[in-house]
Amino acid sequence: MAKNSRLSPNKLADVKASFAGLKTIGGYEPVKKEYEVAAIQPVEAAIDALTEQEAQLLVQLGDVRDELASKGTEFAQKMKGAAQQVIAQFGDDSQQIQSLGRIRSSERSTRKPKPPTA
């Protein structure tokens, strides 16, 4: 299948304007029937329908992304709360807190004071 690149909105508008001009030409009768106005009209209608469908899908995609962001935030908050509950139950130096991907308090590096400057 050949890959067609999408026309830019400006180019598509230019082609549609050309088609509108073609429809106004009286006596236009091409040799090849595939270039008649009646043969081109369904393609333009399909483009309009697909453009509308794309706009609707973009709105749906935005809604799904918003819901995903909301659920992701909720998930992170719930996991933070669960980690606090694990700390409360088992302590911050337990194997259980380490199983959540956190660093045990005994494994944290301590800050060393800077040497005095002369």
Image (cartoon, rainbow, N blue to C red):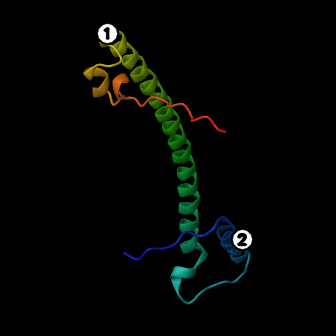
Residue 77 image point, x, y percent: 46, 22
Numbered disc 2: secondary structure: helix
Q: Quadrant location of residue 25?
A: bottom right
Q: Quadrant location of residue 85?
A: top left
Q: Is residue 66 above or below residue 4?
A: above
Going 44% across and 27% down the picture, which residue do you hit? 76
Give me the C-alpha separation between circle 1 and circle 2.
Answer: 71 Å
Q: Quadrant of the N terminus?
A: bottom left
Q: Which mark is residue 67?
A: none
Q: Is residue 71 above or below residue 8?
A: above
Which amino acid, mark 2? Ala
Q: Quadrant location of residue 3?
A: bottom left
Report the front residue among 73 and 63.
73
Location of mark 2 (residue): 17
**For the residues carrying marks 1 and 2, which lies nearer the camera in this image?**
1
Q: Mark 2 Cα within 10 Å, few/some/many (few <14, many 20+)?
A: few
Q: Is residue 21 above or below residue 108?
A: below
Residue 7 image point, x, y percent: 59, 70
Report the front residue among 57 and 20.
57
Q: Residue furthest front?
A: 118
Location of mark 1 (residue): 89
Numbered disc 1: secondary structure: helix
Q: Are marks 1 and 2 in contact (CB under 8 Å)?
A: no
Q: Earlier in the sequence, mark 1 or mark 2?
A: 2
Figure disc tally: 2
